[in-house]
Image (tube, grey):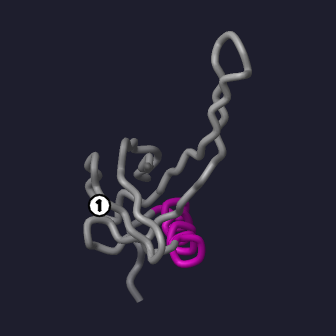
Amino acid sequence: MSRSTLSPFDDALAQADKVITDVMMSVYVINGKEYKAVLDETPKVMSGNYSEDYLINGTARTLTLFRSSGYKPKLGDIITTTTTEYVVRGFSFEDGKIVLQLE
């Protein structure tokens, strides 16, 4: 049995990341390659400055995956599922994760 070179805390985080990957993430195809990620859809409502007569309803969609996945985000990347296609319109890096803004 080999000993881990990680601290107990880092080892626990790695185990938690594995559980998240195995249980919570689904497979998405980005430019023809499969990655595990989590899709989040949040309703968004915007109104004009002067009147609520100008309400715009929509949905903000993000796809989050671990940086360790090896994916290198680029604007315009195509993400597909069995039923839907998305386009990457923005991205950020947060705490070891890649967060893609989708359209």
In the rendered image, residue 24 lying in the magenta stretch gets the answer yes
Residue at 26% in and 66% down: 31
Residue lying at the far right of the rendered structure: 52
Q: Is label 1 in a helix, a strand or a loop?
A: loop
Quarter of the figure with residue 77: bottom left
25 with respect to 91 (left or right): right
Q: Who is closer to the viewer here, 26 or 68?
A: 26
What's drawn in magenta, residue-wise?
7-25
Q: Which residue is mark 1?
A: 71
Quarter of the figure with residue 48: top right
Q: Residues within 10 Å of mark 1 (few under 14, many from 20)?
A: some
- Find residue 99 and report its horizontal and vertical position in percent: 44, 49
Residue at 47% in and 56% down: 63
Assign the magenta stretch its main secondary structure.
Answer: helix
- Find residue 89 and report its horizontal and vertical position in percent: 36, 44
Residue at 38% in and 44% down: 91
Q: Quadrant of the N terminus?
A: bottom left
Residue lying at the far top of the rendered structure: 50
Residue lying at the far front of the rendered structure: 53
* Amino acid beneath label 1: Tyr
Residue at 26% in and 55% down: 72
In the rendered image, residue 11 lying in the magenta stretch gets the answer yes
Total labels: the figure holds 1
| As drawn, 73 above or below 33 | above
50 with respect to 37 (left or right): right
- Find residue 10 and report its horizontal and vertical position in percent: 49, 61
